[in-house]
Image (tube, rainbow, N blue to C red):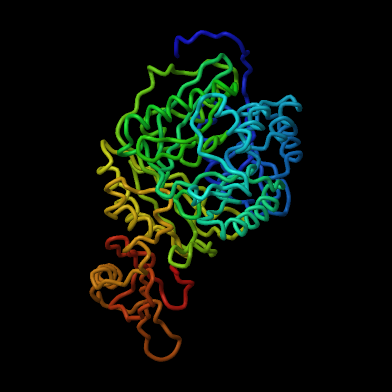
Amino acid sequence: MSNAQSTSGHTRRIAKVLIANRGEIALRIMRTCQQRGIGTVAVYSDADTNAPFVTTADQAVRLGDTNATSYLDGAAIIAAAQETGANAIHPGYGFLSENAQFAAAVEEAGLTFIGPTADVITQMGRKDHARDVAVRAGVPVTPQYARDSVPTDAWPVLVKAAAGGGGKGMHIARDANELESALQRAEREAIAGFGDGTLLIEKYVPQGRHIEVQVFADSHGNVVHLFERDCSVQRRHQKVIEEAPAAGLSEAARTTVLTAAVALCKEVGYTNAGTVEFLVDGDDAWFLEMNTRLQVEHPVTEEITGLDLVDWQLRAAAGDVLPKAQHEIRATGHAIEVRAYAEDPYRDFLPQTGRIRHLEWPGNPVRVESGIEAGANVTTAFDPMLAKIIVHANDRAGAIEAMRAALDQTAILGLTTNLGFVHRVLGSHEFAAGSVHTSWLDTRPAGIFDKPDCPDIVMDQAARIAMPPATGGLPTDGWRSSGPARAPQLRLHCEGGEPVWTEPAAEPTSGVIGVSDGVRVWLAHEGQHWLGA
């Protein structure tokens, strides 16, 4: 424990936690709770009845027959906590995690909300209010403009929803002619997604890096940072690859973002876990927003610090002093996280659906956070993220190599994913050089978005594994009740290419992949639901 002294606050025991979320983050929270001997309660919609997070929890409560709306029903979630005897609620991320009304209702019900106070969420959950707090704290912010008075030298500008998040309600205007259209689109999305059409217009930095700082604060006045992450590889303002620490960040910029993040928390009276996001260009850094919750990419921070961030959340929510003071927190090595999405990168990242026919994850020491299993149906009801794959190495080059190897050992078959695409991103010169910025993927860099051909080496590799020499006897797939056995056909499919049908010399093994430089081949028997798309 840190020797930081308690100046205020009180301790309250957390005995059972209801997780107001689903999928991999629900499992992640349960893991720490179970390690600490804390009971867990899952809530679920009918679509998730047999999901791993439901069966793993000590107790589970059905919320309703609809999908996303079930996890947005704050009153039902609080009632489930009271019914099961849970005395705390962890919101995870997404859904109600940054909903101040929900946080307040949890506390009013006599339960502990594992996050900041409702008042702080109100201040920091909106981009316009958070910007005002940043100014008071002396944190640098990007220039802001009124819709009818954008200076001629200010273009391009970024239009974004004040109440938004996750890239929704966010559009770039490169000149005055594009501004009105950007405003109209952003306003429509903001009203539909957040019920609030308030917009901000700020200076857009086309080649800025997205750098964010993990912060923690307790109710005794202690605030620390757990170093920074780089989340610049994005599509449609959504993160794809995250890493810690940020490579090639100048010491001036690093000092600015770490110092500013702590100052911001102190200014607003923050408690629990949070992330302060910045736009960085060279030595300059500007405050973007604050996420008042645990982040999807928190594992890379855990990997370099050796700390359990969910454990810290539980301790802070219970009123404990933070486990470590700033001088006791160290960062070692380099960590990278890849988000596995059910989407087609070569068709404008369109979400994909389907049944997962075959699933393979890399083994230790690769860390996988996933809420899916073979046989699960992936729909468009929820975010397309299927899993997070995390590696840690002594340095960045080693982490890149480890991640590419981990992706080669990963198979999510039955629907199109972005795994081959991120493999190519990781192998690019730009990523290796650490020169990637937030709009890099939007420029469609050469070699990244070219639909991959099926190299002979990949097909040969798959064929050697799938079609071993004949061993005598007849493959069962070719058996017929009358007449000679027919040799079964095998379909080899290369990502981005047309299926190739062939006759194997012996019965093949389904689900084997050939991989070369991120181009993936998978296979399935004729007559069965095939394993790739």
Tell which residue pokes out farthest to the front in this image: 152
Q: Quadrant of residue 423?
A: bottom left
Instruction: Please determine whether, in this image, residue 86 is positioned above or below residue 127.
Output: above
- Residue 181 visible: yes
Instruction: Please determine whether, in this image, residue 161 is positioned above or below residue 421.
Output: above
Q: Position of residue 240 (x, y in %)?
A: 44, 50
Q: Position of residue 439 (x, y in %)?
A: 43, 52
Q: Residue at x 35, y 39 (%)?
A: 282
Q: Position of residue 271 (x, y in %)?
A: 58, 23
Instruction: Please determine whether, in this image, residue 445 is positioned above or below residue 36.
Output: below
Q: Quadrant of residue 74?
A: top right
Quadrant location of the N terminus in the rendered image: top left
Depth check, front residue: 332 or 13: 332
Left or right: 366 with respect to 132?
Answer: left
Q: Residue at x 61, y 51 (%)?
A: 169
Q: Residue at x 54, y 37 (%)?
A: 289
Q: Position of residue 447 (x, y in %)?
A: 31, 63
Q: Quadrant of residue 306?
A: top left
Left or right: 146 with respect to 475?
Answer: right
- Residue 468 visible: no
Depth check, front residue: 311 or 269: 269
Left or right: 188 with respect to 131?
Answer: right
Quadrant location of the C terminus in the rendered image: bottom left
Q: Residue at x 58, y 34 (%)?
A: 131
Depth check, front residue: 223 or 94: 223
Depth check, front residue: 351 or 70: 351
